[in-house]
Image (cartoon, helix red, strand yellow):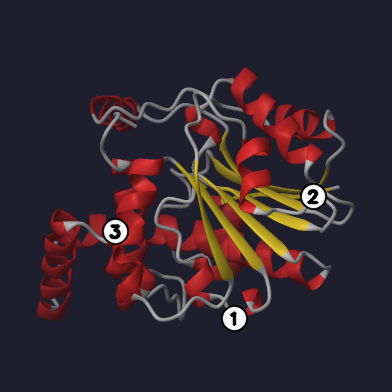
Amino acid sequence: MKRGRPSRTAQLVTLARAIADTGLSHVPNFSDPTARVFLNEKGKKTLEKTERIARGGKPSMHLEAARGMADNLALRTTAIDRAVRDAVVIGARQLVILGAGYDGRAWRMSELAGVKVFEVDHPTTQADKRSHVPELPRPIGAVSFVPIDFEHESIDKVLDRAGHDPSVPTCWIWEGVVMYLTHDAMHATLTGIAGRSASGSTLIVNYHTVRHRFIEHLILRLIGEPQISYWTLEEMAAELGSVGMRVVDDSGMVDWNNRFAQGKSKVAARSAYMRIAVARM
Protein backbone atom coordinates (compact mmCIF):
# COMPACT_ATOMS: atom_id res chain seq x y z
CA MET A 1 0.00 0.00 0.00
CA LYS A 2 1.38 3.43 -0.95
CA ARG A 3 1.91 5.82 1.94
CA GLY A 4 -0.79 8.44 2.44
CA ARG A 5 -3.68 6.74 0.67
CA PRO A 6 -6.18 4.02 1.58
CA SER A 7 -5.50 0.52 0.28
CA ARG A 8 -6.68 0.12 -3.30
CA THR A 9 -6.96 -3.65 -3.02
CA ALA A 10 -9.20 -3.17 0.04
CA GLN A 11 -11.47 -1.02 -2.12
CA LEU A 12 -11.52 -3.67 -4.88
CA VAL A 13 -12.47 -6.32 -2.32
CA THR A 14 -15.26 -4.08 -1.04
CA LEU A 15 -16.53 -3.47 -4.57
CA ALA A 16 -16.68 -7.23 -5.18
CA ARG A 17 -18.69 -7.74 -2.00
CA ALA A 18 -21.01 -4.89 -2.96
CA ILE A 19 -21.62 -6.48 -6.38
CA ALA A 20 -22.28 -9.83 -4.70
CA ASP A 21 -24.76 -8.10 -2.37
CA THR A 22 -26.86 -7.14 -5.43
CA GLY A 23 -27.50 -10.84 -6.08
CA LEU A 24 -25.03 -11.29 -8.94
CA SER A 25 -22.93 -13.99 -7.28
CA HIS A 26 -23.73 -17.70 -7.36
CA VAL A 27 -23.75 -17.83 -3.54
CA PRO A 28 -27.44 -18.01 -2.55
CA ASN A 29 -28.63 -15.25 -0.21
CA PHE A 30 -25.21 -13.64 0.10
CA SER A 31 -25.63 -10.34 1.90
CA ASP A 32 -23.21 -7.58 2.85
CA PRO A 33 -25.03 -4.23 2.82
CA THR A 34 -22.05 -2.55 4.51
CA ALA A 35 -19.89 -2.88 1.39
CA ARG A 36 -21.81 -0.28 -0.62
CA VAL A 37 -21.40 2.25 2.20
CA PHE A 38 -17.59 1.99 2.17
CA LEU A 39 -17.12 2.42 -1.60
CA ASN A 40 -15.17 5.39 -2.93
CA GLU A 41 -16.60 7.45 -5.80
CA LYS A 42 -15.01 5.28 -8.49
CA GLY A 43 -16.38 2.15 -6.85
CA LYS A 44 -19.87 3.63 -6.60
CA LYS A 45 -19.86 4.48 -10.31
CA THR A 46 -18.71 0.94 -11.19
CA LEU A 47 -21.43 -0.56 -9.00
CA GLU A 48 -24.10 1.67 -10.55
CA LYS A 49 -22.94 0.67 -14.05
CA THR A 50 -23.00 -3.01 -13.14
CA GLU A 51 -26.51 -2.77 -11.69
CA ARG A 52 -27.72 -0.89 -14.76
CA ILE A 53 -26.34 -3.53 -17.14
CA ALA A 54 -27.76 -6.34 -15.00
CA ARG A 55 -31.23 -4.77 -15.16
CA GLY A 56 -30.95 -4.69 -18.95
CA GLY A 57 -30.78 -8.48 -19.00
CA LYS A 58 -28.40 -8.73 -21.96
CA PRO A 59 -25.14 -10.73 -21.99
CA SER A 60 -22.13 -8.50 -21.36
CA MET A 61 -18.40 -8.97 -20.84
CA HIS A 62 -18.55 -6.35 -18.07
CA LEU A 63 -21.30 -8.28 -16.33
CA GLU A 64 -19.45 -11.59 -16.57
CA ALA A 65 -16.27 -10.03 -15.19
CA ALA A 66 -18.27 -8.46 -12.36
CA ARG A 67 -19.94 -11.79 -11.57
CA GLY A 68 -16.52 -13.45 -11.44
CA MET A 69 -15.29 -10.85 -8.95
CA ALA A 70 -18.47 -11.22 -6.91
CA ASP A 71 -18.21 -15.02 -6.80
CA ASN A 72 -14.57 -14.91 -5.74
CA LEU A 73 -15.15 -12.65 -2.74
CA ALA A 74 -18.58 -13.99 -1.81
CA LEU A 75 -17.13 -17.50 -1.53
CA ARG A 76 -14.12 -16.36 0.50
CA THR A 77 -16.27 -14.19 2.75
CA THR A 78 -18.81 -16.94 3.35
CA ALA A 79 -16.08 -19.47 4.20
CA ILE A 80 -14.57 -17.11 6.77
CA ASP A 81 -17.99 -16.24 8.20
CA ARG A 82 -18.62 -19.95 8.76
CA ALA A 83 -15.32 -20.30 10.64
CA VAL A 84 -16.07 -17.22 12.77
CA ARG A 85 -19.44 -18.67 13.78
CA ASP A 86 -17.77 -21.94 14.76
CA ALA A 87 -15.20 -20.04 16.86
CA VAL A 88 -17.92 -18.13 18.71
CA VAL A 89 -19.82 -21.37 19.37
CA ILE A 90 -16.78 -22.89 21.10
CA GLY A 91 -16.26 -19.82 23.27
CA ALA A 92 -14.47 -16.95 21.51
CA ARG A 93 -15.54 -13.65 23.13
CA GLN A 94 -13.10 -11.44 21.23
CA LEU A 95 -12.60 -11.01 17.48
CA VAL A 96 -9.42 -9.44 16.14
CA ILE A 97 -9.41 -8.56 12.44
CA LEU A 98 -5.86 -7.99 11.18
CA GLY A 99 -5.67 -5.69 8.18
CA ALA A 100 -9.40 -5.09 8.58
CA GLY A 101 -9.81 -2.82 5.56
CA TYR A 102 -13.51 -2.25 4.97
CA ASP A 103 -14.66 -5.39 6.78
CA GLY A 104 -18.34 -5.19 7.75
CA ARG A 105 -18.74 -8.23 9.99
CA ALA A 106 -19.24 -6.22 13.20
CA TRP A 107 -22.31 -4.62 11.59
CA ARG A 108 -23.85 -7.63 9.88
CA MET A 109 -23.11 -10.82 11.87
CA SER A 110 -25.69 -11.38 14.61
CA GLU A 111 -23.37 -13.98 16.20
CA LEU A 112 -21.07 -11.14 17.30
CA ALA A 113 -23.54 -9.78 19.85
CA GLY A 114 -21.58 -9.52 23.11
CA VAL A 115 -18.25 -10.04 21.33
CA LYS A 116 -15.50 -7.40 21.48
CA VAL A 117 -14.26 -6.64 17.96
CA PHE A 118 -10.81 -5.13 17.42
CA GLU A 119 -10.17 -3.83 13.89
CA VAL A 120 -6.41 -3.52 13.35
CA ASP A 121 -5.25 -1.64 10.27
CA HIS A 122 -3.06 1.06 8.78
CA PRO A 123 -4.18 4.51 9.99
CA THR A 124 -4.92 5.90 6.51
CA THR A 125 -7.25 3.11 5.44
CA GLN A 126 -8.83 3.01 8.88
CA ALA A 127 -9.46 6.76 8.91
CA ASP A 128 -11.22 6.51 5.55
CA LYS A 129 -13.36 3.65 6.83
CA ARG A 130 -14.27 5.49 10.02
CA SER A 131 -15.45 8.49 8.01
CA HIS A 132 -18.24 6.25 6.62
CA VAL A 133 -19.19 4.49 9.86
CA PRO A 134 -21.86 7.10 10.79
CA GLU A 135 -23.79 5.96 7.68
CA LEU A 136 -24.13 2.45 9.15
CA PRO A 137 -26.52 1.23 11.85
CA ARG A 138 -25.15 0.61 15.33
CA PRO A 139 -22.63 -2.26 15.30
CA ILE A 140 -23.65 -5.65 16.67
CA GLY A 141 -20.21 -6.31 18.12
CA ALA A 142 -18.48 -3.77 20.38
CA VAL A 143 -15.96 -2.26 17.94
CA SER A 144 -12.56 -0.81 18.81
CA PHE A 145 -10.52 0.70 15.98
CA VAL A 146 -6.82 -0.04 16.44
CA PRO A 147 -4.51 1.90 14.10
CA ILE A 148 -1.04 0.44 13.64
CA ASP A 149 2.12 1.44 11.82
CA PHE A 150 3.18 -2.07 10.84
CA GLU A 151 6.76 -0.91 10.22
CA HIS A 152 7.30 0.50 13.72
CA GLU A 153 4.69 -0.98 16.09
CA SER A 154 3.94 -4.49 17.30
CA ILE A 155 0.50 -6.05 17.36
CA ASP A 156 1.14 -6.99 20.98
CA LYS A 157 1.60 -3.37 22.07
CA VAL A 158 -1.30 -1.86 20.12
CA LEU A 159 -3.74 -4.55 21.30
CA ASP A 160 -2.62 -4.06 24.89
CA ARG A 161 -3.45 -0.37 24.58
CA ALA A 162 -6.80 -1.17 22.97
CA GLY A 163 -7.89 -3.45 25.83
CA HIS A 164 -7.59 -6.88 24.23
CA ASP A 165 -7.46 -9.55 26.96
CA PRO A 166 -5.04 -12.40 26.14
CA SER A 167 -6.62 -14.58 28.84
CA VAL A 168 -9.97 -14.67 26.97
CA PRO A 169 -10.43 -16.95 23.90
CA THR A 170 -10.04 -14.91 20.70
CA CYS A 171 -11.00 -15.48 17.08
CA TRP A 172 -8.42 -13.96 14.75
CA ILE A 173 -9.19 -13.16 11.09
CA TRP A 174 -6.12 -12.74 8.90
CA GLU A 175 -7.74 -12.22 5.50
CA GLY A 176 -6.00 -10.88 2.42
CA VAL A 177 -2.78 -10.00 4.27
CA VAL A 178 -0.14 -12.75 4.48
CA MET A 179 0.40 -12.81 0.71
CA TYR A 180 1.81 -9.28 1.04
CA LEU A 181 4.29 -10.28 3.78
CA THR A 182 7.64 -12.00 3.67
CA HIS A 183 7.77 -15.36 5.43
CA ASP A 184 9.82 -13.79 8.22
CA ALA A 185 7.29 -11.00 8.76
CA MET A 186 4.46 -13.50 8.69
CA HIS A 187 6.18 -15.65 11.33
CA ALA A 188 6.83 -12.63 13.58
CA THR A 189 3.16 -11.64 13.47
CA LEU A 190 2.05 -15.24 13.97
CA THR A 191 4.24 -15.48 17.07
CA GLY A 192 2.53 -12.36 18.43
CA ILE A 193 -0.90 -13.84 17.74
CA ALA A 194 -0.04 -17.09 19.50
CA GLY A 195 1.26 -15.19 22.50
CA ARG A 196 -2.10 -13.46 22.91
CA SER A 197 -4.25 -16.53 22.27
CA ALA A 198 -5.80 -18.27 25.26
CA SER A 199 -6.69 -21.95 25.03
CA GLY A 200 -9.74 -22.30 22.77
CA SER A 201 -8.70 -19.45 20.46
CA THR A 202 -9.06 -19.76 16.68
CA LEU A 203 -6.96 -18.30 13.86
CA ILE A 204 -8.50 -18.01 10.38
CA VAL A 205 -5.73 -17.29 7.89
CA ASN A 206 -6.25 -16.67 4.18
CA TYR A 207 -3.19 -17.51 2.06
CA HIS A 208 -2.16 -18.30 -1.52
CA THR A 209 -0.41 -21.44 -2.74
CA VAL A 210 1.02 -20.18 -6.06
CA ARG A 211 1.88 -16.92 -7.76
CA HIS A 212 -0.89 -15.08 -9.63
CA ARG A 213 -1.03 -15.25 -13.39
CA PHE A 214 1.29 -12.65 -14.98
CA ILE A 215 -1.37 -10.03 -15.76
CA GLU A 216 -2.85 -10.16 -12.25
CA HIS A 217 0.62 -9.97 -10.69
CA LEU A 218 1.47 -6.98 -12.90
CA ILE A 219 -1.72 -5.10 -11.97
CA LEU A 220 -1.08 -5.55 -8.25
CA ARG A 221 2.51 -4.36 -8.66
CA LEU A 222 1.40 -1.29 -10.65
CA ILE A 223 -1.04 -0.20 -7.93
CA GLY A 224 1.73 -0.54 -5.36
CA GLU A 225 0.51 -3.67 -3.57
CA PRO A 226 2.47 -6.63 -5.01
CA GLN A 227 1.93 -10.09 -3.56
CA ILE A 228 5.17 -11.71 -2.47
CA SER A 229 4.35 -14.72 -0.27
CA TYR A 230 3.11 -18.19 -1.25
CA TRP A 231 2.72 -21.35 0.82
CA THR A 232 2.01 -25.01 0.28
CA LEU A 233 -0.58 -26.65 2.55
CA GLU A 234 2.23 -28.50 4.31
CA GLU A 235 4.27 -25.32 4.82
CA MET A 236 1.30 -23.46 6.30
CA ALA A 237 0.46 -26.33 8.66
CA ALA A 238 4.09 -26.50 9.79
CA GLU A 239 4.24 -22.73 10.31
CA LEU A 240 1.09 -22.74 12.42
CA GLY A 241 2.31 -25.79 14.32
CA SER A 242 5.58 -24.03 15.15
CA VAL A 243 3.68 -21.62 17.45
CA GLY A 244 1.46 -24.30 18.99
CA MET A 245 -1.54 -24.05 16.68
CA ARG A 246 -3.25 -27.13 15.24
CA VAL A 247 -4.92 -26.94 11.82
CA VAL A 248 -8.52 -28.21 12.02
CA ASP A 249 -9.50 -27.29 8.47
CA ASP A 250 -7.75 -26.18 5.29
CA SER A 251 -9.99 -25.55 2.31
CA GLY A 252 -9.85 -23.76 -1.02
CA MET A 253 -11.97 -22.11 -3.67
CA VAL A 254 -13.11 -25.39 -5.23
CA ASP A 255 -14.29 -26.60 -1.80
CA TRP A 256 -16.15 -23.34 -1.11
CA ASN A 257 -17.77 -23.46 -4.53
CA ASN A 258 -19.16 -26.92 -3.79
CA ARG A 259 -20.20 -26.05 -0.21
CA PHE A 260 -21.75 -22.63 -0.75
CA ALA A 261 -22.60 -22.28 -4.47
CA GLN A 262 -23.62 -25.82 -5.48
CA GLY A 263 -20.57 -25.88 -7.77
CA LYS A 264 -22.02 -23.15 -10.01
CA SER A 265 -19.23 -20.57 -9.75
CA LYS A 266 -17.02 -20.40 -12.83
CA VAL A 267 -14.06 -18.83 -11.01
CA ALA A 268 -13.31 -21.75 -8.71
CA ALA A 269 -10.83 -23.61 -10.91
CA ARG A 270 -8.68 -20.61 -11.86
CA SER A 271 -8.76 -19.29 -8.29
CA ALA A 272 -7.73 -22.60 -6.73
CA TYR A 273 -4.57 -20.96 -5.32
CA MET A 274 -6.70 -19.16 -2.71
CA ARG A 275 -7.07 -21.06 0.58
CA ILE A 276 -8.13 -20.63 4.20
CA ALA A 277 -6.55 -22.51 7.11
CA VAL A 278 -8.40 -22.66 10.42
CA ALA A 279 -6.19 -23.42 13.41
CA ARG A 280 -6.80 -23.64 17.14
CA MET A 281 -4.78 -23.28 20.31
Instruction: Write down the quadrant of residue 158 in the picture.
Output: top right
Q: What residue lies at 65% left-to-right and 31% top-to-bottom?
A: 189
Quadrant of the image occupied by residue 42: bottom left
Tell me where residue 114 sits by quadrant.
Answer: bottom right
> From what the image shows, is residue 50 above or below residue 173?
below
The numbered dot on residue 15 is: 3
**Could you tell which of marks 1 and 3 lies nearer the N-terminus?**
3
**Residue at screen point 29% across, 27% down:** 224
As shown in the figure, which amino acid type bears the numbered disc 2?
Pro
Residue displayed at 46% across by 71% down: 27
Q: Nearer the viewer, mark 1 or mark 2?
A: 2
| Circle 1: residue type | Ser
Name the residue beneath numbered marker 2.
Answer: 166
Mark toward the start of the polypeptide (1 vs 2): 1
Above or below for 187 versus 96: above
For the residues marked 1 and 2, what is the alpha-carbon distance in whole angstroms? 24 Å
The N terminus appears in which quarter of the rendering? top left
The reply to whether the C-beta atoms of the residues labelled 1 and 3 are less than 8 Å apart is no
Q: Nearer the viewer, residue 67 or 13?
A: 13
Q: Which element is circle 1 on?
A: helix
Mark number for residue 110?
1
Residue 105 appears in the picture as rendered: yes
Question: Is 149 in front, or is 53?
Answer: 149
User: Closer to the N terminus: mark 3 or mark 2?
Assistant: 3
Q: Residues within 10 Å of mark 2 (few under 14, many from 20)?
A: some
